[in-house]
Amino acid sequence: VESFEMLDDNTFEALPIKDGSGNPIYYDNPMDLFSGRDPRLAGTVVLPGAQGKNRTVDIFAGYQLGNGTVVTGNALGFLGQLPGVTGDVQLVGRDGPLDAREYAAQSGFYVRKFVDPAIGSGSRGTGSEVPWIRYRYAEVLLNAAEAAFELGEGTKAADYINQVRTRAGFTTPLTAGQVTFDRIVNERKVELAFEGHRLFDMKRWRLAHIVWDGVTMSEADLVSNIGSATKRSTQPFALWPYKIHNPGQPNHNKWIFKIVKNSIVTGSERFVFGNYYSEISADNLARNPKLVRQPNQ
């Protein structure tokens, strides 16, 4: 999510969920955390509290009490007790998140891109009028920007990439000097998210073994080196919103966010170097002794 830049100054910033002392930052509305970001973020994933299929998407992981204790449940829309409240209270969002539970916003988000907004679409046995787009003009422009950059034509590269960013909602264009390899890699990452390009891009840039090196990640790793082409990405993290229950205090009914690593994330992605190459069949190897067997066969 941090890969989506700030809209006003084309910079990368970690989501402000803690202050400089490590204390949580409180929000009146969960959507406020994402204010001022590249609009493509909200077009790519469903944010907590956003609208989806004519209703507010209900994503929150529980309540945090004044003493830091979390009160939650183990089912979508779970009902339970809160201190000082008579009767049952909804302790988990109707749309999640739940740890290790399929279809329950484990990441704290749902995918929005290319999802049919019509009510009922996407359910099993229900068709959709939204096509899967395999090749978009934005990719043509990003291909051209990358080619121009590699040829040392920075002004032309900036023009191509700014066409994509202007359509997305940016008002401050990138200069030729701001178009770097890191910027090109990140622009493809956010513009083409969930379209099946990331693995192939990392392979052709020979970065796959670097970003997926099998090393376990920490929360500090997650929020550092944002926008870098070689940023490690070996484990998925989640971002879960919590409501504050602290009656009589100024933060009562406000929202905080916590970075979470789901319990099912027990390993780390590791790209084997031999996977840069395609397999050569045994028949072809037998017919041509000059062919060199790729190292992963």
Image (cartoon, helix red, strand yellow):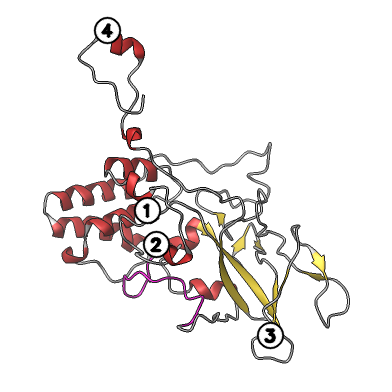
Disc 3 on helix, strand or loop?
Answer: loop
- Which percent across, then down, holds residue 263? 62, 54
Disc 4 on helix, strand or loop?
Answer: helix
Looking at marks 4 and 3 on the same chain, the residue that comes earlier in the sequence is marked by 3
Q: Which residue is mark 3?
A: 252
- Residue placed farthest to the front in the image? 215
Looking at marks 1 and 2 on the same chain, the residue that comes earlier in the sequence is marked by 2
- Which percent across, then down, holds residue 72? 73, 67
Looking at marks 1 and 3 on the same chain, the residue that comes earlier in the sequence is marked by 1
Q: Which quadrant of the figure has residue 174?
A: bottom left
The residue at 65%/50% (across/down) is 103
Looking at marks 2 and 4 on the same chain, the residue that comes earlier in the sequence is marked by 2
Mark 4 and mark 3 residues within 8 Å of each other at the beta carbon:
no
For the record, the magenta segment spans 5-19
Looking at the picture, tell me which residue is in the foreground, 118 or 207.
207
Circle number at residue 3: 2
Q: Residues within 10 Å of mark 1 (few under 14, many from 20)?
A: some
Residue 157 visible in rendering = yes
Amino acid at circle 4:
Arg
Looking at marks 1 and 4 on the same chain, the residue that comes earlier in the sequence is marked by 1
Mark 1 and mark 2 residues within 8 Å of each other at the beta carbon:
yes
Residue at mark 3 to residue at mark 2: CA–CA distance: 31 Å
- Residue placed farthest to the top in the image? 287
Q: Which residue is mark 4?
A: 287
Residue at mark 1 to residue at mark 2: CA–CA distance: 8 Å
Residue 39 visible in rendering = no
Foreground: disc 1 or disc 4? 4
Looking at marks 3 and 2 on the same chain, the residue that comes earlier in the sequence is marked by 2
